[in-house]
Image: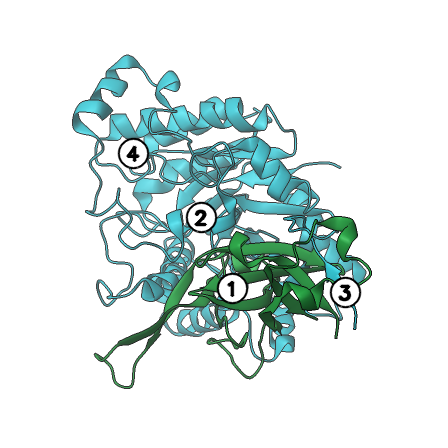
Amino acid sequence: MARHVIAPVDEFPPGTRKFLEIDGRPIAVFNIKGEYFGLSNRCPHQGAALCEGPLIGLAQSKDPGEIEYSRLGEIIRCPWHGWEFDVRTGQSYCDPRRFRVKAYPAHVEPGASVVKGPYVAETIPVRVESNYVVVEL
Amino acid sequence: MNIQFRETTESASPPTIKTAIADCDIHPARATRTELYPYLAKRWQHHLDVYGVHAYQGMMEGPPYPKAQPNASRRDAYPPEGGPQGSSLSFMQQQHLDPNNVQLGVLNPLGTGQGIRNHELSAALCSAINDWQIDKWTSKDKRLKASIVVGNEDAMTAAAEIRERAGDKNFVQVLLLSRNVEPLGQRRYWPIYQAAEEAGLPVGVHAFGFGGNPITPSGWPSYYIEEMVGHSQCQQSALASLVLEGVCERFPKLKMVMIEAGFGWAPSLCWRLDKVWQRLRSEVPHVRRPPSEYIREQVWWTTQPMEDPERREDLLDVIEWIGWDRLLFATDYPHWDYDEPSRVLPPGVSEANREAFYLGNARKLYGITA
Ligand code: FES
């Protein structure tokens, strides 16, 4: 599994997302309250750029009239038809058996561990003292 | 271990060559509230500033529901220069017409002045919208064709508008909505059908409208989701009314297009109509043939929103019944329930049927040669 450096941590604050293309695949990475999540940016329904949708919460109900709204900001809602997916897992809330968005592990690694690759220095001046957000695919 | 350092980009995947399509339901929007003013007499500009519009039902201006996405539109369809989704020709070209290889796009403006109680204002607004469609859209992009919007509740004035536009190649159909003050087959609307038949223009009946009646036959529902399915119920009663009041019989050359209300219900509506017609025929002797015959001869259907059955072959069975020559592909751009052209048909459809579905039927119906 290849690891791809996305950005230095201090250039990727909470509440923001980045869109990128890695090996021809459109991907979005989110910083939600300091946690990082990577998702394919193609909706499995009809192919919209899924991650341009809003981050909402999860509305659930055990009984008519009782509504629980939880996990605020952790559910991505497609900009076209509004299908909802869990940003943590890519799981669909409309039809979890058939649809899922590919989720890519994203995390922070210290600069010292990511500067060793052969491609690093060519594209971005890397400061070894920084931490970097890394996506695996 | 392979580590690659990536620049963040917003670049999309390379464009793919897509099948040529007709999009028979595109919704152009106005960028500003006053965008129609140049096409309106001073008298109506002042009227709008002072009194606004008076609809047959409340809650017409602020949408009665937030409509699932802002302005009921794709969130990614805001033009970069500002304004609501669907208000910029250049962005529509760049986001939809060019990449989806749209060869023919039929414009159906909404929020036009149809269903307004002041009939003079309604006529003025509809006429202004028609001028605006030419100026802002069809004269600037030859792929786009307009629908003649008419003040439907005053059928004589509506017919005059149709006659005035007849023969103008910018227009390819007359636009009505499914929700009116009365069911669409009633005689008060017949002058519209007469004028359309004379002009050789199909009448498109688009889901929607503000006739003052609830969207469902059982009253005002609680949820937007009920309105979404209510549109097909509405369209069914509009179509039943058109057949049973004798519109099809009286105007045999009239062509009608059912727009944005699905088509999966067409077979069952026809079966039911035929069955009760056999038993109650003497009540409506002017309906001389089984209702399904009129429908098969005079009605076309736009596809969006396509039904999406669990077994995708079921969809092909329905289309087989309706006829591959009767469907007109539509996306509903820029609205949120947009259908992506490459994703709607299950595999296994013959090349000839695909071509008819995506382009050929629309070209034939609207008289557009390649
Ligand atoms: S494309 Fe995402 S919900 Fe349809």
Q: What residue did someone put label 4 on?
A: B154
The hue used for chain A is green
Quarter where residue B36 is shown: top left
Secondary element at image label 4: loop
Q: Which mark is residue B196?
A: none
- Cα separation, mark 1 vs mark 3, equals 73 Å
Q: Which mark is residue B292?
A: 1
Using the rendered image of the protein, determine whether residue B366 is visible from the camera's viewpoint.
no
Whether label 2 lies within 8 Å of ligand 1 gets the answer no
In this rendering, the label closer to the viewer, 1 or 3: 3
C-alpha gap between disc 2 and disc 4: 17 Å
- Which chain's residue wears label 3? A
Work out whether mark 2 precedes mark 4 in sequence or the reverse, and give the earlier one. 4
Rendered location of residue A63, percent (x, y): 25, 85
Q: Which numbered circle lies on residue A116?
A: 3
Q: Residue at x 30, y 47 (%)?
A: B180
